[in-house]
């Protein structure tokens, strides 16, 4: 069940989303793709959490990578206020074929999914253009312990 974003959750999500998108834009501009990565807010301090391929089995695909992230995030410490899980997806939305999907979860039970479309333009397809973010209305399983215990 997706709960309406309240002020506390939105404030915490904004911290994580801004940090994540700032980094993602730099990575996309350089590498042209994103690997899944999580960010979380513990005691008001945002941090990234990357699971490297060495932390999992070799030859893992993105779907399995996301499964490992969700398992990791479901065991976060109780002082985790919020977390996000971001990854690259293919879409058909307006004039975009690619997007960054972001799953948002707050310790108060709020959870949501959004995407930020992007594309490359210019003669050499090297100019990154980010579109307007869009909330997705779909049911998600909670990824934080405290939210799943409600």
Image (cartoon, rainbow, N blue to C red):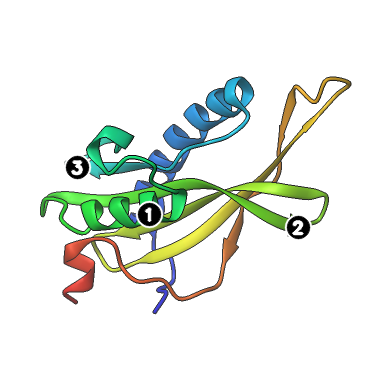
In the image shown, does 7 or 134 lie closer to the viewer?
134
Element type where label 2 sits in the image: strand
Disc 3 + disc 2, Cβ < 8 Å: no
State how far apart marks 2 and 1 are (Cα). 25 Å
- Find residue 42 and name its label: 3
Q: Pinpoint residue 84: horizontal percent, then vertical percent.
A: 37, 49
- Find residue 93 and name its label: 2
Q: Pinpoint residue 21: horizontal percent, then vertical percent.
A: 51, 35
Q: Quadrant of residue 142?
A: bottom left
Element type where label 3 sits in the image: strand
Residue occupied by mark 1: 64
Side (left or right) of 128 relative to 74? right
Side (left or right) of 17 relative to 109? right
Q: Residue furthest right?
A: 123
Asked whether the viewer can see residue 24, the reply is: yes
Nearer the camera: disc 2 or disc 1: 1
């Amino acid at each position: 069940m997706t709960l309406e974003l309240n002020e506390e959750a939105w404030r915490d999500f904004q911290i994580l989303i801004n940090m994540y998108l700032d980094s993602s834009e730099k990575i996309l501009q350089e590498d042209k793709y994103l690997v899944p990565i999580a960010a979380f807010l513990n005691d008001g301090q945002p941090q990234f959490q990357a699971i490297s391929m060495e932390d999992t089995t070799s030859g893992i695909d993105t779907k399995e990578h996301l499964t490992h992230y969700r398992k990791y995030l479901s065991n976060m410490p109780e002082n985790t206020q919020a977390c996000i899980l971001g990854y690259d997806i293919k879409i058909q939305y307006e004039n975009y074929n690619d997007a960054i999907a972001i799953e948002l979860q707050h310790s108060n039970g709020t959870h949501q999914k959004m995407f930020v479309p992007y594309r490359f333009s210019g003669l050499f397809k090297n100019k990154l253009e980010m579109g307007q973010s869009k909330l997705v209305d779909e049911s998600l399983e909670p990824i934080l312990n405290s939210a799943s215990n409600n």
